[in-house]
Image (cartoon, rainbow, N blue to C red):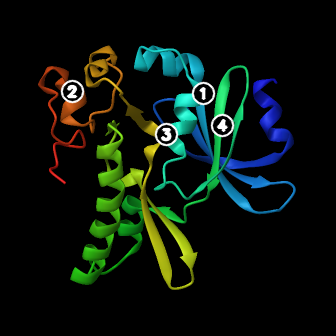
Amino acid sequence: MASNDIWTNFIEKGIISHGIFGSIYKGINKQTGNYVGIKEINKLKYKKLSGTPFNEEEIEKKINLPINTTLKETINTEKNFYIIMDLAISNLEDFLKMRESPFSIIEIKEILNQLNEDLKIKERENIIMKDMKLSNILIFLDKINKITIKLSEFDSSKFSDRTKVNSINLEEIPLTSAPEVLNAESISNKSDIWSWEL
């Protein structure tokens, strides 16, 4: 399947952002007419940055974690791997810029509680958030009065052996990377997510 075959089923409506492995698109499903988010992972870039060959089964295992309720389907092409997911209404960085008033204590508590559940699972699965920043905290509208906060895990790395952190090309990782990635020799059995004890 050619890399542009994905656009036979979806209409590209613009680029939301650029991740470390590829772009994130806003698209429309041609069959349903619904908006979706489309995460593109360039396989060669993945291999270069992670130091390991692209493994579809490993990626599928990671994105099928219970915390990821936004996944719709995946499409594997010759050059790229695409993750089709629910479209977030915003990220936390943009949402803060849209608000005139600061978050209330109750709102902060709700955000932190939801993020904590994500982080607990990532800790258990040995997943390191490579690029922890406000724009990677996504907001989904489940119901008119209910939002869900999710960490964007598609720029994360899963290590069955924590020493694999050494294989990451440190010159190409973001400035917002976790200390465990920037200082690989300090890996221990504590939380791999920003050194937070959960």
Q: Tell me the distance, in whole angstroms, between the alpha carbons under discs 2 and 4.
A: 28 Å
Q: Earlier in the sequence, mark 3 or mark 2?
A: 3
SS type, badge 2? helix
Q: Amino acid at mark 1?
A: Glu
Q: Tell me the distance, in whole angstroms, between the alpha carbons under discs 1 and 2.
A: 26 Å
Image mark for residue 182:
2
Task: Name the residue located 27 percent from the left edge and 16 percent from the top edge.
Answer: 166
Of the two numbered discs 1 and 2 in the rendering, the one whose residue sits closer to the viewer: 1
Q: Amino acid at mark 3?
A: Lys
Q: Is residue 131 left or right of residue 90?
A: left
Q: Earlier in the sequence, mark 1 or mark 2?
A: 1
Q: Earlier in the sequence, mark 3 or mark 4?
A: 3
Rendered location of residue 150, percent (x, y):
43, 59
Neighbor class of circle 1 (other Cα within 10 Å; few <14, some 14-19, many 20+) is few
Task: Name the residue located 55 percent from the left edge and 61 percent from the top edge.
Answer: 88
Image mark for residue 62:
3
Q: Are marks 1 and 4 in contact (CB under 8 Å)?
A: no
Q: Quadrant of residue 103?
A: bottom left
Looking at the image, residue 149 lies above or below residue 80: below
Q: Amino acid at mark 4?
A: Tyr
Image mark for residue 56:
1
Q: Are marks 1 and 2 in contact (CB under 8 Å)?
A: no
Q: Earlier in the sequence, mark 1 or mark 3?
A: 1
Image mark for residue 82:
4
Rendered location of residue 101, percent (x, y):
30, 81
Q: Tell me the distance, in whole angstroms, between the alpha carbons under discs 3 and 2.
A: 22 Å
Q: Is residue 166 left or right of residue 41?
A: left
Neighbor class of circle 4 (other Cα within 10 Å; few <14, some 14-19, many 20+) is many
